[in-house]
Every structure is written in C-alpha cells, then in structure tokens.
Amino acid sequence: MLFPTIDFGLFFAFALWLVWSLNSRNLLKKWVLLALSLAFYASWDWRFLLLLFASGAISYLVGLRVGQEAGARRPWRKAVLALGIALDLGILGYFKYLDFFIAQALTLAHAFGLNPPLEFVSVTLPVAISFLTFHAISYIVDVYRGRLRASRSPLDILLYISFFPHLVAGPIVRAHEFLPQLASPRRAEDFGLSENMLLILGGLFKKMVIANYLAVQFVDPVFTDPTQVSRFDLVMAVYAYAIQIYADFSAYTDIAIGVAALLGYRFPQNFNQPYRALGPGDFWRRWHMTLSTWLRDYLYIPLGGNRHGALMTVRNLMLTMVLGGLWHGANWTFLIWGTLHGVALVVDHAYRHSAFCARFGRTRPAMALDWFVTLQLVCVGWLFFRSPSLDVATQYLAGIWTDNGAASTMPGVVWPLLAAGVFTHIIPPDSRLRLGEWLDARGLSAQIGFGAVAMYVIIVMAPSASAPFIYFQF
C-alpha cells in the first residue's frame, strides 16, 4: 500500500475517522492504531509481520532488563544491551547482507583457486527492515543510557516500532519523542488541518509529478545504459537525479509527517533545504536529518567522536559514513558513496578548524565557492548511489570523461521539472504555515475545496507511469 494511491487514501480516511472517534478511549485507540499499522505492513507481505513482533518483543524484553537500575554500573546490563543489539543486527544482516557477503567470500576464494561449498540464500528483502532496526536499537540504547524509562506496555513498544506513517521509509522517530505522546488522548486543536493538508499535498506533487517524471522520462533510461548516452545527458541526468531523490524522499517524509500529525502525533523534521549547504557537514545537518543524528548519537559519539585527537576523529568519521553507506544497501556503490562522504567530512572538518577558514571562510566569494563545491561533491556521490552496480558507475564516469559523440536526447520537460524541483527546495519554510493560517480563517468548505482542486491538478499533471519510492529498498 503506497502513499500516493487510492487504496491508501481510503485507508487513511477510515483511520482518521476511527482514531479521532476513539480519542477519549486512549487504550482502545492504541489497539486500533496497532491493528491499522499491522494491516498496512501486511499489505506488502503478511509473513513479515513476524519481524515486527520479533523486533517488538526484543525491544520490550531488553528494555525492561537494561532499564533496571538505569545508570548503575552493572556488567550484566551491558551484556543484555549487547545481546539485544546483536539480535536486531542479526535479523537485519540475514535479510539484507548475507548474500552480499557470500558473494564477496566466493570471489575471494576463487581468486585463490578455492571452491568452498557456499550457496546463496536468496531471501526476500522485507520492506523497511533498516528503519525497523534503527527504531528498535535507539529505544534499548536510550533506556540503557537512562534517557527514558523502560515502557512496561508491550502495546506501546509494538506500536512505536510499527506505527504506519514512519514504518516504511522514516523519518526515524526516537522513542523519547513518540512514546510520551501515547500516554494520553490528543488535542485536535494542536494539529492544524490546513498546514498538514498542505504538507501532504506538497509531498504528493513532489513525488507524483517531479520525481516520477524525472525518473521515468530521463534518469532511469540514462542509468540503464550510460554507454549509449551523450556526455551532456550523462551530466544532466546526475543533476536530475539530485532533484529526483530530494523530491522523492522529502515527499515521503512530508506525507508521513502530515499523516501522523492529522492522527495526532508529531514527527521530527527530516529535510532543511539540503542543497543550500555550505560544506559536507552542513549538508548532513540538512539531509535526512533523523538518520544523520542517529548515526551521530549511536555510532559516531560512542566511537569517540572528536574527543581523542585528529587521527581518531578521522577514523570515527570514516567508520560512521562507510557504515552509513552500507546501511543503504549491500552494494559496493553504497560503500563508495559512504566513503566519498566520509572523506569529504574529514576534509571539511580540517578546513573548518583552519586559520584560513577563520579569516576568509565567511566572505561572500568563499561561501559561494563552498556552496558550489559541496553541491558537486554531493552530485558525484549521487552518481554512485543511483548506479545499480560498480560496472555501470564506471561506464558512466567513462562516458562523461571521453564523450561518445552521441546527440542529446534529453526531453524538453526536464527543464521545467528541474525548475519546479528547485522551487520546492528554496521556498521559505514558513510559507506553508502562512497559507495554512489563511485557509483556516476561511473555514472547512474552503479547506475542502482547495484540497480537492489541488489533488485534481496533481493527478492530471502526473505521468501515467510511476517509480517506487527510492527509500523503500532500504
């Protein structure tokens, strides 16, 4: 069940009516939300509901155990925490990485003339397993650190793990942000109808029109066979993909945040105009912000952060970004993407602490160069991120370098789509709030009318073919 479909529209309309009609009966409402979330996930494959129950059970039991005497120095607490993390990562590793590591082991063995009896498992990758794992790990670690009390409600933990707006592709919601919201009925007046309707409509426009057109009409064909494409098209497809992935992923999280808000629950912001970043570090403070802070809090800082000298800082940055790249998928292209960003962060860290940056870094020319270089680095990274294999990425780079002399076949529709993507990126963040207040002042009929017209326009403008959400594969 996908967000921009009639099926989800009907599902959400029913959920919205049911949840608010039960708002005063909070316990029953939570059971209903859990049932809706399980039905939402089962629409892909009901067999993987076992993953949700397993993850919820691990989180609940480990949380209770490590929550005892939180903050006390008890060796068994660390051992239980390690067991919980190992179980969560073991489930993730089996489904997502086992065949990749078997392939690498076979390649290495064959290079030495060996033929070990290893066979591929060929398991189906469950939707959202990476996001599921991150939610589970953050809960038990935060309980261990004493940041929040262990929940004694299995229902609350399973609902936190499986809540359908964030389940498939985020944003990554911390337990301390979500669990307190389950404690009492929600107040409808705290969640603006117009503002969140505009957030959802904007997400639908970015996905159904901008991202889908760019993917189907231009980006996908170019990356399918870059050897047959002109240099100009190869370069433009990278920039088009930068807009596509922003429109695609920010659209999903916009819709998720808006849907959750209309149900009475707040999610954290996940994007903040990332292509305006001045430096790789600034980019990661603006792009997929909930993943960036997760990697910082549960990987980079536990590794030592920047507390133990320059060499350890370099190591910790590189490990964090390489593992962040691997989290996205079992493919060398993701490892290279993560490594590229790791190197960029290391260089950026050194530059920010240099005397040159202190003296000249805030001048207009320096900031303009900073923005330009950052954007190019990010786009080079997207080339590897989008390429289905290392061979394709190599062919792509070779085509840009050598130019096969082919004529450009880029459709004319790409230019207005790029312009629309840039506009959705740079539009002032408070514009939606102001428009929402304007609609609220005109009453429910104006809100319904505006929403209906906007939805009709989006449907008419959308292409007949569509592309899946990019982050569904993670």
Image: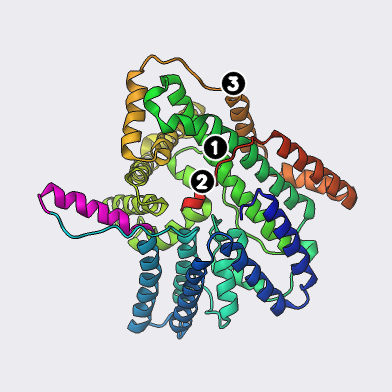
Identified at 65% across, 51% down, the residue is 255
Tell me how far mark 3 sits from mark 2, CA to CA. Answer: 24 Å
Q: Is residue 356 visible?
A: yes
Q: Is residue 26 left or right of residue 409?
A: right
Identified at 39% across, 38% down, the residue is 387
- Amino acid identity at mark 2: Ile
Q: Quadrant of the N terminus?
A: bottom right
Q: Is residue 402 above or below residue 197?
A: above
Q: Is residue 99 left or right of residue 178?
A: left
Q: Earlier in the sequence, mark 1 or mark 2?
A: 1
- Amino acid identity at mark 1: Gln
Does the magenta segment cover residue 151?
no
Tell me how far mark 3 sits from mark 1, CA to CA. Answer: 16 Å
Q: Position of residue 277 (x, y in %)?
A: 51, 38
Tell me how far mark 1 sits from mark 2, CA to CA. Answer: 9 Å
Q: Which residue is mark 1?
A: 244
Q: Which residue is mark 3?
A: 412
Q: Earlier in the sequence, mark 3 or mark 1?
A: 1
Q: Nearer the viewer, residue 277 or 397?
A: 397
Magenta span of residues: 96-114
Q: Which residue is mark 2?
A: 470
Q: Position of residue 90 (x, y in %)?
A: 36, 67
Q: Nearer the viewer, residue 77 or 391?
A: 391
- Amino acid identity at mark 3: Gly
Q: Dot 1 surroundings within 10 Å: few (below 14), some, or many (20 or more)?
A: many
Q: Is residue 57 left or right of residue 322?
A: right
Q: Is residue 21 above or below residue 154?
A: above
